[in-house]
Amino acid sequence: MPDLPEAYQNLRSRGREIALLGATGGLLGWDQETLLPPKSHGFRAEQSAQISGIAHRLATAPEVNEWLSVCESAQPDPLTAEGACLIRWRHDYNRATRIPTSLVEENERTAGMARAAWVEARKKADFSSFAPHLQKLVSLSRQMADLWGYSNEPYDALLEGYEPGWSTREVASLFGELQPRLVPIAEKALAASPSFSRKNLSGHYPQAQQEKFLQSLLPKIGFDTASGRLDTSTHPFCSGLGPHDTRMTTRYDETDFTVSLYGVFHEAGHGLYDQGLPEKELGTPLGQAASLGIHESQSRLWENRVGRSHSFWKAWWPDLIHAFPDLARRSWEEGWRASNAVERSFIRVEADEVTYDLHILLRFQIETRLISGELKVADLPSAWNDLFLKLFGLKVPNDSQGCLQDIHWSMGGFGYFPTYTLGNLTGSQLWQAAQLDLPNLHSCLEQRDYHPLLQWLHQKVHAHGRRYLASDLVRHATGKPLSPDAHLSILETKVKDLGSIQNS
Amino acid sequence: MPDLPEAYQNLRSRGREIALLGATGGLLGWDQETLLPPKSHGFRAEQSAQISGIAHRLATAPEVNEWLSVCESAQPDPLTAEGACLIRWRHDYNRATRIPTSLVEENERTAGMARAAWVEARKKADFSSFAPHLQKLVSLSRQMADLWGYSNEPYDALLEGYEPGWSTREVASLFGELQPRLVPIAEKALAASPSFSRKNLSGHYPQAQQEKFLQSLLPKIGFDTASGRLDTSTHPFCSGLGPHDTRMTTRYDETDFTVSLYGVFHEAGHGLYDQGLPEKELGTPLGQAASLGIHESQSRLWENRVGRSHSFWKAWWPDLIHAFPDLARRSWEEGWRASNAVERSFIRVEADEVTYDLHILLRFQIETRLISGELKVADLPSAWNDLFLKLFGLKVPNDSQGCLQDIHWSMGGFGYFPTYTLGNLTGSQLWQAAQLDLPNLHSCLEQRDYHPLLQWLHQKVHAHGRRYLASDLVRHATGKPLSPDAHLSILETKVKDLGSIQNS
């Protein structure tokens, strides 16, 4: 758009201002999860609300609409980068202007306080102390959904914030296809599982040794450690706080090094995506992640397809037994089997790859009903426990291992959970496509050469930022629309492999 | 002012918004010093500049002037809290509006980049790589000083930012009185010193043991560890990031636990002041520190009057030898003497109490000449080295141990250094007054009861915030204007005590 330099440049500059504020808000949040003194949560909630409010005001100022209109009147080709940016910017502007800044601030402040209350409630397995906070957050989300607007149900409007382009019905239909095909695979795996439990790897793995190993692993898979950090937190996460500030956290279990190992593989998958976004596009949609589902596809791919592979265990075995002498009494095949053990468990973040999506199906059912009003906050624990029994055949012992386990609802993050399963399916579908595109992939991984894979992901996913909707990005990268086929086929093969090795 | 509730409330609210932004900017800075990935300094500089710019715009908006004028027209009694706040607010507003927001942002951005360059330059003792940054910062400070205005010299306008009410001439005159009286004391101490060097305490003191001891010490002296943190950084500092978020850093030397011990005593003195500011006044001058000199008086008092006292070493000796078994071959008197050893040294932050102010006198002379233009940036190293030789009789081996040692200039902090000596003198004068007011002070300290001292400091200093100018606060608290008398008398007695014990 050579005739529209000024309005377009103004949009870019404004986007950059908002991105800077986003990074600052991100640091406030990161610090809250990792370091903040306990008595300071109220003040921090005010700080976060203020930054969100300033960013919202900048995003919804009338001049943004003027700049957009000037650019749109030139009817730019939507297939160009500029045209695509304008479509995303217009979408963001329209969505943001539908809610007042005061509501953004109130939601942020409420979430800040709720998060602190949730930490305490979870410690004491005391849902009742968290319930009033959750009630407020549900009401605020519902209020925002009504303002944003939706065609079928309020949850649509929340989902749109995390996974643009997907409706509740579409997710329900995809999950409805997944569940009956996943359950038999899970049952088969569960039946075979006890003989290669993760307990087989138990030993003494001092945290310092784990940290040292992980710091040596990260650069090998392509993570730039001068542009990021690895810290400790109760709930592992990854925050992109700027083009050269990708912060991951993990947690350590000194009897089981795979907790931090797969935690870091997962977060590094997110981190590699953040580090792969084009730096010069910071502030435009091209410098942002496509969606949470696409983000999760990266973390899951690195965690499960790379980290839990034959090739990883075989190629890294000498390093692993050097770092963790207690492992030496085992073989790499046992390590590989144990890291893929399937078990029924209460906690989502500890779940194996096969049963993981059942945890998401449960949360999706619960939160759509919370938002529609069909399920009352007070009835959440019993609804959770009933559904858990149905899906997993286990009785939830207390709410800390049930409906209080995840941070998401305490942050008002309704609509977030389904992106995990979308990410799982997408990760597997990308993996299948990468194998077709890179015939040498397997031998590269066996030689610990992760560069071709990272390059492929960069070209197919990272480099595009938010230029395409997630569904289009998947279609471009894999040649077909998202379906559970690739994921189920991969799981099926893996369960078979594990079984046959076990029986051999 | 019951008739002016609205304009006054508006000023309070605006002040609170600015304080929140200040805390957020403070976190950006704290994180930069402690955790930021190396490649992210440029981006962080942009973030800090943005937050400073937003705060400056809020502070200088025309409505602030209107609110001030409405309140002022009611001619409030300047002896009331509200009247005092209005005087400070008016001062701040007038000063802030004299420089454009763009200059504030440019200064912040330049400082952010300069700080990263300084870290590298200091590592390599390469002044030339830092010089262009310093040149920019000197020019920017000079530009701001010219806009702020001054009666005698541009440095006045910079000093006003750190120590309101003090002029360059007044500082020069006070320092001129101090120097000729301090030098003979220092010479006497230096002559006696070698026999009780800090090396006498050398041993193996694992960092974890030091951390544990410090974490037990902090609550005993009244620091609320649930409203603050202690972390590690190359350059120890304390940041008040909110009413319940006081963050101190220290550094560890595993052969000398007194490095972290006195680092923490010092920063805790700052921290106790921050924690003692009235929380409900956040955003008004009553919720802010009076000046950097007053801040430093607290850190110096806790570090030198409490931490380096007979009573500390005697009362804490059982705990110290329990924490640090290598100490057991020494006596508490030896510990006390070693912690008070006087030595000529290149590095300010490692200097003993007696020679410390000579380091400040040097910096004051240098920076006033840098800002007046009399000294060129290129000539800084030689000017520094010449003056150092004159004051300390030592030849500076390289710029890392000379003019590159401190962070202050890399942050554009010209006018900051004299506050250290003002703080030293103030701390001693407060200490003398506390001894008169609290006849049992000594026996309390011998029983490790720090409450009466902290209460006295709270009443006399902390609780007033920035209600009074520093010079008035000192007069109210001690009954006389600030002079070097108390400090010199304390040093003289201490040097005599150390000498007599040594000879006994």
Image (cartoon, coloured by chain):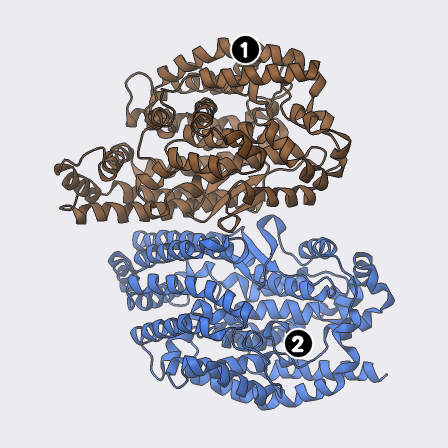
Chain colours: A blue, B brown
Dot 2 corresponds to which residue? A352
Which of label 2 and label 1 is nearer to you? 1
Do callouts 2 and 1 point to residues on the same chain?
Answer: no
Question: Which of the chains bears the disc numbered 2?
Answer: A
Dot 1 corresponds to which residue? B183
Query: Which residue corresponds to the image point at 59% horizontal and 22% vertical from the top-left?
Result: B352
Compared to residue B154, the image places residue B324 above or below, namely below
B255 or B371, nearer to the observer: B255
The quarter of the picture where the N terminus of chain A appears is bottom left
Separation of marks 2 and 1 at Cα, in angstroms? 72 Å
Compared to residue B346, the image places residue A376 above or below, namely below
Toward which corner of the image does residue A344 lie, by quadrant? Answer: bottom right
The reply to whether the C-beta atoms of the residues labelled 2 and 1 are less than 8 Å apart is no
Residue B83: image x %, image y %? 22, 36
Q: Amino acid at mark 2?
A: Asp
Query: Which residue corresponds to the image point at 27% horizontal and 61% vertical from the top-left?
Result: A65
Compared to residue B67, the image places residue A486 above or below, namely below
Query: Which residue corresponds to the image point at 68% horizontal and 45% vertical from the top-left?
Result: B208
Residue A34: image x %, image y %? 55, 56
Query: Which residue corresponds to the image point at 33% horizontal and 57% vertical from the top-left?
Result: A53
Badge 1 element: helix
Question: Which of the chains bears the disc numbered 1?
Answer: B
Is residue A253 visible in this depiction of the protein?
A: yes
